[in-house]
Amino acid sequence: MSWKLKEILKQRLQRETGHYIYAPGSRSRMALIYPNSYFVGMSNLGFHIIYELMNERADTACERFFLPDKKELEEYQRSHTQLLSLETQSSLQAFPLLAFAISFEMDYFNVLKILELGRIQPLAAERGAMDPVIIAGGPCATFNPEPLSLFFDAFIIGEGEETMERFMDAYYAGLEAHLDRPALLASLARVPGVYVPSLYDSQEDEQGRVLAIRKQAEAPEKVQRQWVADLDAYPAHTVVETEDTEFNLYLIETARGCGRHCRFCMAGYCFRRPRNRSLPALEKMLLAAKAAGKRVGLMGAAISDYPEIDVLCREILGDGLSMSVASFRADSVTRELVTSLAASGLRTLTMAPEAGSARMRAVINKGIEEEHLFHAMDLGIAAGIRNYRLYLMIGLPYEQPEDIQGIIDLAGRLKDYMEDRGCRGTLTLSINPFIPKPFTPFQWVPMAPLKQVEASLKAIRTALRGRRNIEIIAESPKEAYIQGVLARGSRRISAVIYEAHKLGGSKAFKRSMKAAGLQMEDYLYRQRTREEIFPWDMLDMGFSREYLYQELEKAARLQPTMKCFDGCKRCGVCR
């Protein structure tokens, strides 16, 4: 074992406060794994929530693992050391239960890298009685677990707080009953919100299209997504404090879910219904933030939609704290919120119109108009904020060349607006290719051709090149198209990921697709039929398939859908 690696981990641990360490042998061990760097993983609030939840049990010692950075990875390979935990520098093989938190498709390749570094058999079907049980949760596991189905014994579908408690109870009960591996997995499948892929058979044709999904007798027909009805029962805030994170904030979740019905947004559908934490519950978490002496990072789908946002802002600044927000909507932003952000040192105000033209915003049901953007900019300029950022997508369904021109024109009008008001700051366009996602109205539609997206991006760059202080940043289109396959991939994609891993990772993905006899075009550019069986059809998010298809038809007609309201029964979640 490498002394150097142990020292790196010990020093990282010394820079933390709030972690848990238990006496060896006093509790059953569980590994909580984020398949990316410590820097990224410790910025994930869900990771903190599950870490605390598991360690607050009387029977579990939960320790963290992360993907090593480049220098650490070289040391692991040079010293032939197995992957080590942060808390006690124990090898991954020492843990009988491994739990991955997966938020991004491109981290699928990191999952296999971590298992390789830990000397863990990657294929679930080949793991035996002495091997760990491996599970996954998080957004990717909830929306479409099939591209990972070869590697995991079970998936947590939905929000993890209550499901993980029930899962752990069933897991320990199975161990006490000395159940063999198949019997243990069958018992776990009876826990609401737990999907065990080995109990389902997905039949596919040569193009990877699903023909049928058949379950074994002990498996439920549908695995129902779980969600927390009372957020106040589960505080959600930074648990482990460290400077070594992407945001370096004390994170506090104000709300969960979103009822705005943006048609592209998987989180908006799969975290429905929208729920707010009470102000007293948030005030308790603010006391911990004050003790930590850190800037507060408010988390939620749209912070400006929180009903008491102005009161919350006044309390944060009144306590001598500063603040930041994950996002806000330009149509609900308040002067108090913007002023509080400016007083906290915010230098760039971010808005997310998602599309440049009113037509495209109607397609996606965004509900943001230019007047909202100008109003938010007015508030920002009055508060002394000089820089502005827009989140935009290209390649959206029903997009036309004039919609790309709409992005160019919108950027020009907003920059003119800034300059007319004496604001000489930078306007940044953050542009990403649209990726159709499961459980959204756009799950049926093709992804826009790569060449079209590249041409649109080039047209935007060329048109705005002469404008001073307009910056364009864009996600790699080629990587986005790998994500496009992974997002709606079938079970056969799991084998492709495995082969790509053996050939070096994501860069070998397209080559591995061809070797498997699959074409990326079949996953990316094909219009799905209304009746098509999707790889994720064994999951139930609480709303009907028919509702989603009606939303797709409304998108084509540019018809709006109003946001959630009390007593609404439209989608089925609140039935």
Image: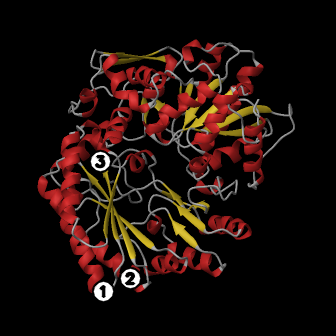
Element carrying mark 2: helix
Residue 506 as seen in the image, left or right of residue 93: left
> What residue is at 41 percent from the left and 73 percent from the top?
333
Q: What residue sits right under mark 3 in the picture?
A: 433
The answer to whether residue 508 is above or below residue 290 is: above
Q: Residue at x 59, y 55 (%)?
A: 231
Q: Which mark is residue 460?
A: none
State if disc 1 and disc 3 touch (CB < 8 Å). Answer: no
Closest to the observer, 317 or 278: 317
Read off the residue under disc 1.
Answer: 421
Q: Position of residue 291 (x, y in %)?
A: 74, 68
Apparent side of residue 554 relative to residue 378 in the rendered image (left or right)? left
The amino acid sitting under disc 2 is: Ile
Q: Secondary structure at mark 3?
A: strand
Q: Where residue 381 is drawn, which disc sits there?
A: 2
Residue 358 visible in image: no
Q: Amino acid at mark 3?
A: Pro
Determine the CA span between mark 2 and mark 3. 30 Å
- Label 1: few (<14), some (14–19) or many (≥20) C-alpha neighbours in 10 Å: few
